[in-house]
Image (cartoon, helix red, strand yellow):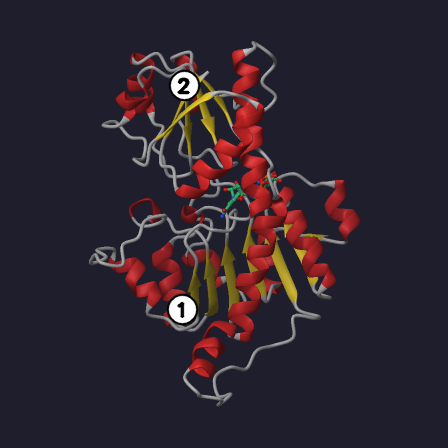
Amino acid sequence: MNVTFFNTKVYDQQFFSEANKDFRHKLKFLEVPLNENTAVLAKGSTAVCVFVNDLVNKQVLQHLAQVEIKLVALRCAGFNNVNLKAAAQLGIKVVRVPAYSPYAVAEHTLALILTLNRKTHRAYNRIREGNFALNGLMGFDLHGKAVGIIGLGKIGLVTSRILKGFGCRVLGYDVARSKEADEIGVEFSDLDNLYAQSDIISLHCPLTPDTYHLISDASIAKMKDGVMLINTSRGAIIDTRAVINGLKREKIKYLGLDVYEEEGDLFFEDLSNKVIQDDVFMRLLSFNNVLITGHQAFLTIDALQSIAKVTLQNITDFEQGKELVNELQA
Ligand SMILES: NC(=O)c1ccc[n+]([C@@H]2O[C@H](COP(=O)([O-])OP(=O)(O)OC[C@H]3O[C@@H](n4cnc5c(N)ncnc54)[C@H](O)[C@@H]3O)[C@@H](O)[C@H]2O)c1
């Protein structure tokens, strides 16, 4: 099947080309993101393959339908950027990769926690400059601390398991209670209790109307003084302005982000020669207790191999009229 890929980087092209040896689809790799102006570039393909910040709203879907696109294949798990209702109305199917490597994201979450705590990023720079002073590098034992996990799905559970290995007490909140969480020893909790008791809070729920700005002035007020907040899920789960206020008041003592609510204008591009216009983002960068990575939690060899394989299998299943096990329904 002819497939147009939007928003691709070298690593996408590399991993998809390699995996495609087993599938033999005709892949067209574009670097431009999908939006109303670029949708027309998919002409000649039956499917488009898109990533987290590609815009798949009603207008874009209408443009895709006009060039006879029948399938949108997301090469990611989250799908908050897709208007599923509009896709259904236009007869366009949407598939995703529900699970590629929860370990990739969970382990990156731990990287953020450990770096913020033990300040290895600052130590690295100091030592290179011949500064062996330890002032300002003090951390705390993770052992015995309470960590609140919001969203006990695949990634939240792996994160919980790792934290249990560190000897942490893990409190978890989810809209649905799972047996697996109980087996790991996660203490199921309501949100208010989780906010009140957790030394570290890590977000692993999807971005939905219910979770939009879940972390707000009101929820931050319920948290422990000096809390560490980690978000590797989706940026808009956090109200960034509320978090900046929390950092200024030192209510939040550490912030680790792999995602940012306005990341679409920044992430995945080299802007080092440009003036960044996002003042909120620049304010975040001014805190020495804020660590931001540019949506890289998924970026492991294992995850990319799995994403490529599952995405191409989704496309093959569609081509062969098989049941779409990874279809998203409106
Ligand atoms: N940073 C990255 O590179 C990256 C990579 C993959 C996924 N993600 C994000 O991680 C999120 C979690 O991924 P996953 O694979 O664990 O998904 P999942 O579907 O396995 O788990 C999500 C969990 O959140 C729960 N949930 C839904 N609504 C909730 C709410 N209102 N409050 C609390 N919990 C709620 C669900 O019941 C489910 O258990 C994804 O939605 C995606 O946004 C980020």
Label 2 environment density (alpha carbons within 10 Å; few <14, some 14–19, many ≥20) = many
Vertically, is 176 above or below 166? Answer: above
Please state if 17 lies on the left or on the right of 36 as rendered.
Answer: right
Q: Is residue 225 visible?
A: no
* Residue identifier under label 2: 87
From the top left corner, tell me how far across and down residue 167 is, in percent. Answer: 73, 66
Residue visible at 31% across and 58% down? 281
The nearer-to-camera label among 2 and 1 is 2
| Left or right: 28 as drawn, with respect to 138 | left
Q: Give the vertical position of 257 relative to 290 (above or below).
A: above
Residue 68 at least partly seen = yes
**CB atoms of marks 2 and 1 within 8 Å:** no
Query: Which residue is nearer to you in this view: 123 or 161?
Result: 123
Label 1: few (<14), some or many (≥20) within 10 Å? many
User: In the rendered image, which residue does mark 1 sit on?
Assistant: 247
Q: Is mark 2 within 8 Å of ligand 1?
A: no
Where residue 86 sits: x, y (%)? 38, 19
> Looking at mark 1, is its residue's CB closer than 8 Å to ligand 1?
no
Which residue: 57% across, 31% down? 309
What residue sits 59% from the left and 38% below the top?
100
Viewer-nearest residue: 96 or 304 = 304
Quadrant of residue 271 in the image? Answer: bottom left
Helix, strand or loop at mark 1: helix
Q: CA distance from mark 2 to mark 1?
A: 40 Å
Q: Amino acid at mark 1?
A: Leu
Residue at the image point whose x is 40% and y is 42% from the top: 10
